[in-house]
Image: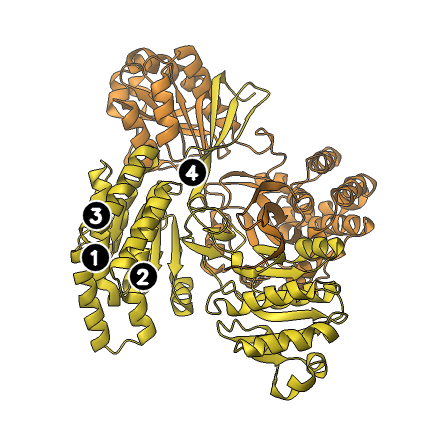
Chain colours: A yellow, B orange
Amino acid sequence: MATTAKSVADVCAEARVASRALATASDAVKDAALEAMASALETRLDEILEANARDMEAGAEAGLAPALLDRLRLDGERVAAIAAGVRAIAALPDPVGEVLEGWRLESGLEMRKVRVPLGVVAVVYEARPNVTIDCSALCLKSGNAIVLRGSSSATHSNAVLAEVAASAVESAGLPRAAVSLVAGGGRSELAELATQEGVVDLIIPRGGEGLKAALQEVATVPVIYAAAGNCHVFVDAGADLDMAERIVLNAKVQRPGVCNSAETLLVHADAAPEFLPRVLRALREAGVELRVDARARALAGELADTLGEATEEDWATEYLALILAVRVVDSAEEAIDHVNRYGSGHSEAIVTDSTASAERFTHAVDAACVYVNASTRFTDGGVFGMGAEIGNSTQKLHARGPVAVRELTTYKYVAEGTGQIRE
Amino acid sequence: MATTAKSVADVCAEARVASRALATASDAVKDAALEAMASALETRLDEILEANARDMEAGAEAGLAPALLDRLRLDGERVAAIAAGVRAIAALPDPVGEVLEGWRLESGLEMRKVRVPLGVVAVVYEARPNVTIDCSALCLKSGNAIVLRGSSSATHSNAVLAEVAASAVESAGLPRAAVSLVAGGGRSELAELATQEGVVDLIIPRGGEGLKAALQEVATVPVIYAAAGNCHVFVDAGADLDMAERIVLNAKVQRPGVCNSAETLLVHADAAPEFLPRVLRALREAGVELRVDARARALAGELADTLGEATEEDWATEYLALILAVRVVDSAEEAIDHVNRYGSGHSEAIVTDSTASAERFTHAVDAACVYVNASTRFTDGGVFGMGAEIGNSTQKLHARGPVAVRELTTYKYVAEGTGQIRE
């Protein structure tokens, strides 16, 4: 781990040098480093909790909100979960060196397209100290050096955790500078980090909209932004209404504060008279505030008076709370248009018994993940079988959807010849 | 094609709408549009040459350099080559809809990772009017709408060619706005185009460093920059010297003005005494100006006095001319370090008879294309079998190396269930 006296540019330059060794490290060596990291989390638990206690104390004094303090807090159970996560990452197949394609040119050149690490990945994050280890482990497995820039509220926790990670890497014979922490949560450090083009290959922000906006303003290094999830469930004509109700409730209620939860329910006019009264009642009973269009209200029966009015703004809002907008549409086409107009391209679901509607929806909806007869809540690198994720991309370039170890790689073409020249 | 009265934002918004239809168009329909495009280039040849003659006349009056005028010029043969290129693109397999992976989750969800178009691609280019058709055809095949912004010197040529392309698209039943040309080569149009985030998905500049710098300053839309090619050939100890000489000459001389030509020759100290005198003589005879380090000069024999001195600046320069820098190194490691320090990550070659050196070089050199016993000159989408290329990327994110139809796509996850919810 770099000491805090170094400039951000120096830390990044050392990470660049370290990345050369990481790029050619074997899977066995990387896994040994990861196992050392997991073990050290266990053997150095007291030290970690002590550092965290200092952050918690400072946070309480500074009047941090209870939710923020909870994110900051570590305990034995949480550290054990972090260590288990590291071991799960070690158990993933090594993405580096995978031959994506191979072919032979007319000239006899043997071509291979081979997966290789990006080089240096910077992660900029807020309170949660577990990110220090989670992201270090993902970058190590994918052969990348990592430069971490945490928030000042987690200074002591992050310092110990980054030291644990760097020492583990070193114990496996890899360069210590493979994991570095830049000190200081200030905007000038962020700007310096975000302009290390040619040294840092990618920046991943893990935090709120303020952090993203700050990065967008200054970054010359490529950034993968995890955009908001304004997700929809569309219940088609002829849908199995029991299934539809189960999916709508799950997508809205199971964990409303995350980006793959649903924010708007679209119901086909043919299904609405039977479906709306029951689903609105069930949602109300689950504590969901409902904001509906005029057609939905007209079908809501005795609930009509208790429903809010959906405005243009509601269609575009990611509530991240127990609120749901509801609209009646006349066709799958109209639902698709609504989703493509207001959605953020994250996770979209159709409930239908029509293969034609399912095909149309999955083809025409422009989103990272499109579900047929399933909840939007499945969008997650772990659930998808990709291992832990570093975030979820709604961009189209490079990585779309969950960003896990493979998404932290690029490729190179290797051409082997016997003296070929271009005529 | 959009009329010139529309704002850049309007043109892009219409392209966005058109992109929805393109994304779900069948390969047969796209190929019909491409065939119509190729045919119209033939049947409307007079009209095209007439428009081009007006640009040529204006260019001559404005005192354009002969090289620029040559790039601007169309004739029957050149237009026929453009039409043949369009038909070659039609003959490529459709990248859209390719299932990249498929698997089943524990919950029973059937997952597919499917290749889909990006949406709207903008291409910003300079004199060459052939780019209008080449890029329209590549975008059409990959299911993307294209917004073209050419240079003012090619106004009339580009207008006719874009009209030909848009009419061809329309004749196949696809929206005319799939191909649009924004008028005006001014900086304000460029800035407006480069900030259409959420409407334009990608900008590809095809032009000089000035154009790239102008884009870098204003773009909020993702850009794939085709960086310079500072490429190397490393001749290892024990290399077949006949093969090495052939490769060095080909890499430097065959077409020195392109980005995959070599700019620096690195020679292992063990091979240098025998190899340098002969290769330097051969290069001199081919008209190459040589800039060498002290060790190379000491081995150059009678040629020593005719050689320039390589400075730090030479190692970092992409000459794009008949100039070659030459350096003696003590090991493959030293060659790799030189390449990673000064190279631009484009195309790098080793000539060696050692499998260990070949493996070390291909693993450790950080470049889009790495060659063993072959010339750097092979880096090209067409040569690689990817079809025509829209450019060559030295970035690591999204696309590295040749950018052809597949690189103009992204992917989505499609999950088909039977009512699954997240527990």
Amino acid tagged 1: Ala
Res B405 seen here: no
Q: Chain of mark 1?
A: A
| Count of picture labels | 4
Q: Give x and y (percent) for residue B261.
A: 47, 29
Check disc 2 and give the amino acid type: Leu
Name the element at disc 4. Answer: loop
Q: Residues within 10 Å of mark 2 (few under 14, many from 20)?
A: many
Whether residue A412 is situated above or below residue A9 in the rendered picture: above
Quadrant in which residue A406 is drawn: top left
Check chain identity for marks 4 and 1: say if they share one.
yes
Q: CA distance from mark 1 to mark 3?
A: 14 Å
Q: Amino acid at mark 3?
A: Ala
Dot 1: few (<14), some (14–19), or many (≥20) neighbours within 10 Å? Answer: many
**Residue at mark 2 shares a chain with residue at mark 3:** yes
Q: CA distance from mark 4 to mark 2?
A: 29 Å
Q: Amino acid at mark 4?
A: Pro
Left or right: A174 as drawn, with respect to B247: left
Residue shown at the point (62%, 41%) measured from the top left = B99
> Picture coordinates of residue B5 (x, y %)?
70, 66
Percent of width and height locating residue A11: 24, 50
Mark 1 vs mark 3: in front: 3
Residue matched to label 1: A159
